[in-house]
Image (cartoon, helix red, strand yellow):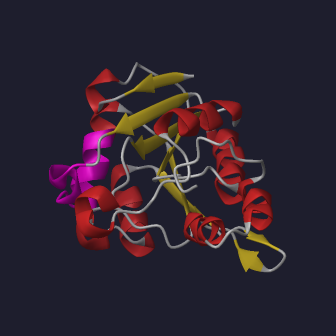
Amino acid sequence: MIVVESLEDIPSLSGPIALTIGTYDGVHLGHQYLFHELKKYGTAVVLTFSNHPSEVLRPDAATPLIDTLEQKLRRFENNGIDLVIALPFTSELSSLAYDTFIQQIRQHLPFTHLILGEGAVIGHQAQGNEKNIQALAQELHFKALYLPKFTLDGEVVSSRRIRHLIETGNFEQAFRLLGRPQTKSHQLW
């Protein structure tokens, strides 16, 4: 797996390229399902952030992390991801419109597919919703696919839910949703 820290450092790739964009904290069962689907469409690329966006957007109430960046990268590799773009989430990045952000990515990575989870939004003020991303996909000639929320026993699996389970001491259920036991280096413990 190749890891880069800027768009300018992305290596040249050919053939179909499937991209997903997200924080992917914890790399839980829902993320793992998305990565499994991502790999069906080409070279699997994850654009993630080296810090949690809440550190910039809500510094007084930053979200505690389930995994460190190093743990997250290891989990990406274990899930067969080919390339990770780990950008620092900055105030400048947070102010970019979704279409500007996507166009900047495409200048360096000619992805053919953008795979996101249901309800995912991109860009300043969450303007890059499914409707707007689908329109942009038509304009820029890529396919945008939205996967339904992943559920286990009828409940949606999410990083927010897992954080709550950890904070309330329900480690067994948190482990189930993560699909693995956590280490003692856990930031929430």
Instruction: Relative to 66, say whether 119 is above or below.
Output: below
Q: Residue at x 40, y 59 (%)?
A: 138
- 169 or 5: nearer the viewer: 169
Q: Residue furthest right?
A: 153
- 106 or 117: nearer the viewer: 117
Image coords of residue 99 (percent x, y):
26, 58
Residue 96 shows in the view: yes
- Asked where in the image residue 40 lies, by quadrant, the reply is top right
Image coords of residue 177 (percent x, y):
74, 61
- Asked where in the image residue 94 lies, by quadrant, the reply is bottom left
Any magenta on residue 91? yes
Count how many numbered circles sit on residues in the image: 0
Q: Residue at x 30, y 32 (%)?
A: 7
Image coords of residue 182 (percent x, y):
70, 47
Image coords of residue 64 (percent x, y):
45, 59
Any magenta on residue 149? no
Residue 17 shows in the view: no
- 6 or 165: nearer the viewer: 165
Stretch of the chain drawn in magenta = 90-105
Quadrant in which the C terminus is drawn: bottom right
Q: Main secondary structure of the magenta part?
A: helix
Q: Residue at x 58, y 63 (%)?
A: 159
- 25 or 148: nearer the viewer: 25
Quadrant in which the N terminus is drawn: top right
Q: Residue at x 38, y 53 (%)?
A: 52
